[in-house]
Image (spheres, rainbow, N blue to C red):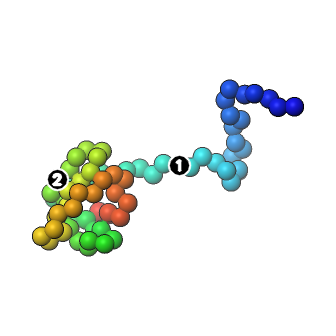
Amino acid sequence: MTSSRSTPRPRPAGSPFRDPVAKPVPTFEVGDRVTHDQAGLGRVVGVEEGIAVLVDFGGREMRIGTPYPKLSKL
């Protein structure tokens, strides 16, 4: 016997199959010092809110899109 539900059954609080929690996207401002796993130390020179940041890594500029996977603020 199968039941057809329009909404999924809620999961118990201790369930290992809970819905993943979205990580908050960090915000950057022009002039922030940052570090990147591959490019090293840099400074934010441009910000496109919610889209990307432009970072100067000592002569090389990179545009890094959200969610900024390898970029962290110092």
Of the image marks 2 and 1, the number of the one nearer the N terminus? 1
Residue 32 in view of the camera: no
In percent of width and height, residue 50 lies at 30, 45
In percent of width and height, residue 4 lies at 75, 27
In the displayed structure image, the side of residue 22 where residue 51 appears, left or right: left
- The residue depicted at 70 percent of the width and 42 percent of the height is 11
Q: What residue type is labelled 1?
A: Val
Residue 36 in view of the camera: yes
Judged by depth in the image, the label closer to the viewer, 2 or 1, is 2
For label 1, the SS is loop
Q: Is residue 73 above or below residue 23?
A: below
For label 2, the SS is strand
- The residue depicted at 67 percent of the width and 50 percent of the height is 17
Q: Find the residue positioned furthest to the right.
A: 1
Other residues around mark 2 within 10 Å, as few (<14) / some (14–19) / many (≥20) = some
Q: What residue type is labelled 2?
A: Gly
Q: In this view, does 32 lie above or below 27?
A: below
- The residue depicted at 69 percent of the width and 37 percent of the height is 10
Residue closer to the observer: 14 or 42: 42
In the displayed structure image, the side of residue 11 where residue 27 appears, left or right: left
Q: Is residue 7 above or below residue 44?
A: above
In percent of width and height, residue 23 lies at 45, 51
Q: In which quarter of the image is residue 64?
A: bottom left
Q: Find the residue positioned furthest to the left.
A: 59
Query: Badge 1 is on which residue?
Result: 21
Q: Residue 42 carries which label?
A: none
- The residue depicted at 72 percent of the width and 28 percent of the height is 5
Query: Badge 2 is on which residue?
Result: 46
Other residues around mark 1 within 10 Å, as few (<14) / some (14–19) / many (≥20) = few
- Quadrant (top left, top right, bottom left, bottom right) of the N terminus: top right
Q: Distance between the residues labelled 2 and 1?
A: 29 Å
